[in-house]
Amino acid sequence: MKFKIALLLFAIMTGTFASAQQHPKNIILDTDIGPDYDDVGAMAVLHALADKGECHILATIASNQYSNIAPVLSVLNTYFKRPGIPIGVVRGKAVNIPCAQKWDSLIVDRYPHRIKDNNEAEDATILYRRILAAQPDQSVTIVTIGFMTNMANLLQSKPDKVSPLSGAALVKKKVRLMVSMAACFNREMGKFREFNVEKDSVSSKITFDNWLSPIIFSGFEIGEKIHTGLPIVKNKSITNSPVKDVFQKSIPLDPNDSKGRMSWDETAVLVAVRSYERYFSVVKGKIICNSDGSNQWDKTGTLDRYLILKMPIPQIEAVLNTLIMHQPKTGK
């Protein structure tokens, strides 16, 4: 009996036991997928949690403009049996960073996908406005695992035929939470310029200075310590998987990934869907975004949080690796 109780407690702690009363979270994923491949792991985690009934994916939206980004999103959504998920791509002035490890071409050439070109995807800002306007108030969680360009563009958007509300008003009315893989909250805070914040520091400052819903930050120092990807590479029963193909190609290309890829983006998705309490502690305050892309923290603030490790790292890695290895549902 004690053993059964212990198993149940572990299942609750790791999130493998979902409350029947828990409503699926409405999630928009905003990603720069390409410069790093932890975004692929994050998408696998998101789709796995959707298959478990823990979330509903409203859209997958790119904050990067490189040519394969919409097809890559389409490949992954199609693989997980959700080819109709709306896909948006940032327009206008934006970061354009290709995939240096060329895993994008590998999966775009190998797997089916509905969207063949970025021009076939929706304008990111228009898609945000359309999706948010259609959702119940305070019901949407946005997960940003890339640049803040789309967030700044959304905040600055004007009323249109989709909604009489400005972008800022839409955010205040519809978004309950943003979870962001961004910034740095260790001893280097104030000096270190985290990639997602620094690459479009203007948009980062606009976003973090003006965002009107709570933000939970999974900082650089969180994902840096958590490594994933080796189990899916070593799992011989998983075949014809774009997720496996990406990790299998990319891990050997970087000596730093010998224990698996650092898992910045997966942690943000996990917290967005399951909340942080099982895995992390938080520090309350308000982010201060500097114009050079570095950040500081106002301890007197109350709206924002940043994560601190709580669950032992091997346990978090086990949770994430299990979700990354999840295979798509059949029969859809």
Image: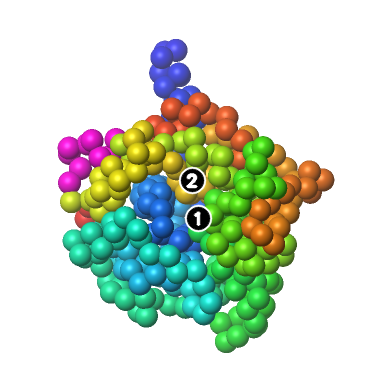
Q: Are marks 1 and 2 in contact (CB under 8 Å)?
A: yes
Quick check: is 172 in the magenta stretch?
A: no
| Residue at (45% x, 18% y) in the render | 6
Foreground of the two, 160 or 290: 290
Q: Quadrant of the C terminus?
A: bottom left
**Quick one: label 2, few (<14), some, or many (20+) residues within 10 Å?**
many
Q: Residue 233 in magenta?
A: yes
Residue in front for this viewpoint, 7 or 246: 246
Q: Which mark is residue 264?
A: 2
Residue type, numbered disc 2: Trp
Q: For the residue marked with disc 1, what is the amino acid?
A: Ile
Q: Is residue 76 above or below residue 6?
A: below
Residue 90 point in image, percent of width and height = 48, 73
Part of the protein shown in magenta: 231-239
Looking at marks 1 and 2 on the same chain, the residue that comes earlier in the sequence is marked by 1
Q: Kindly state the secondary structure of the residue where label 2 is placed.
A: helix
Q: Quadrant of residue 275?
A: top right
**Which quadrant of the rendered structure holds the N terminus?**
top left
Q: Which mark is residue 246?
A: none
On the rendered structure, is 26 left or right of 178?
Answer: left
Q: Can residue 148 be seen at all in this image of the molecule?
A: yes
Residue for badge 1:
145
Q: Quadrant of residue 112?
A: bottom left
